[in-house]
Amino acid sequence: MTNDRISTFVRECQLFAGHALVVRASATHRALVEKFVSRLPSPDNPLETVVMDDLLFKVAARWSQHVHEQLHVDKSFLCDFNADADLVDVWRIRHTCPVHSFSKWATLFLDKIEQSHRPPLTLHVKEIINRGIENRMSVRSLARDAGCHPVRLRATFKRDVGMSIREYQTRRRILRAAQLLVESDVKVDAIARAAGFSNRKNFYKAFKRALHTNPSAVRNWSGADLEAFEERLFPRTDSHEQL
C-alpha cells in the first residue's frame, strides 16, 4: 500500500467519523455510509487487506457508539442497546474486501437501531406535522403514518401535549408565520401561504385569536418577543421533548 493510498484511506475514515458526530437523522446516516463506502479503494494485495480491515473495524466500533449516543443526548432513561453487538460476528465472515464487510455491517446496524429507537407515538406525529407545516394533515392520515388507530392517536396526543392535533397544527402555523414576519420582509399574503393557511381570512382570524392583534404588528417584535410567544403557544406540559 503506497503512502498516498494510505493517506487517502485514513483521511476518508477521519472525515467519515467527523461527519458522524453531527449527523442525527437515520436516513442521512445511510447516505453518509453510502458515500463513504463509494470513496474507499479496494485492497490490491494481502497487506492492504489487513490494514484496511483493521482500520475499518475500529471506525465501525467508534461510529456505532457515536450514533447511539446521539440518540440519547439530554435523555435520562437507560438503554440496553448494544451498538457494536454484530460487529465481531460480521467481521468473522470472510470477505474478499473489508469495505464489503463494513457496508454489510453498517446496513445491519442502522436497521436494528432504527427499529429499537422508534420515537414515542406523540413525538413521531409531532415530527410529521412540523416537517410538513404547510400541508393540511388529517388525523386519519397521521394515524396511518404512525401505524395506529385514529381514536388512540387523538387520545394519546391530547394527553401528552395538552391540546388537540388540530390545535397543535394551527399553533405551529401561527408560530411559523410569526417567525417569517420577524425575520423577513416577505408580504403577509405570501407568509400566510408558506405557513399553511388556505386564505388570508383564516390567517388573520387565527392570529387574532392567538395574539389579539394583526400580523403586521409582529414585524416589530424582537427575538425575545418571539421566544415568549412560542412559550405561550407550546407550554411544556407534555413528557416528550418539545420540537
Image (cartoon, helix red, strand yellow):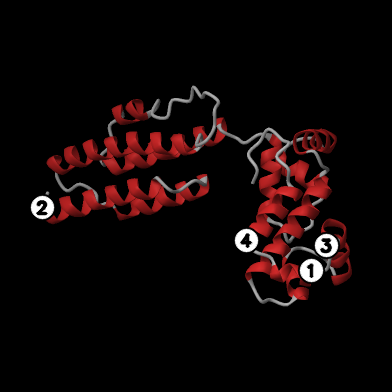
Q: Is 226 on the left or on the right of 48, as rendered?
A: right
Q: Is 1 on the left or on the right of 87, as rendered?
A: left
Disc 1 secondary structure class:
helix
Q: Specify which label sits upstream in the sequence, 2 or 3.
A: 2
- The residue sitting at 24% across, 49% down in the picture is 42
- The residue sitting at 71% across, 38% down in the picture is 122
Q: Nearer the viewer, mark 2 or mark 4?
A: 4
Q: Residue 77's image quarter?
A: top right
Disc 4 secondary structure class:
helix
Question: Contact (CB < 8 A) between labels 3 and 4?
Answer: no
**Residue designated by label 4:** 223
Q: Nearer the viewer, mark 2 or mark 3?
A: 3
Where residue 215 is drawn, which disc sits there?
1
Mark pair 1, 4: CA separation: 16 Å
Give the residue type that dot 3 points to: Phe
Question: Contact (CB < 8 A) between labels 3 and 1?
Answer: yes
Give the residue type that dot 4 points to: Gly
**Residue designated by label 2:** 2
Looking at the image, residue 184 lies above or below residue 155: below
Looking at the image, residue 225 lies above or below residue 111: below
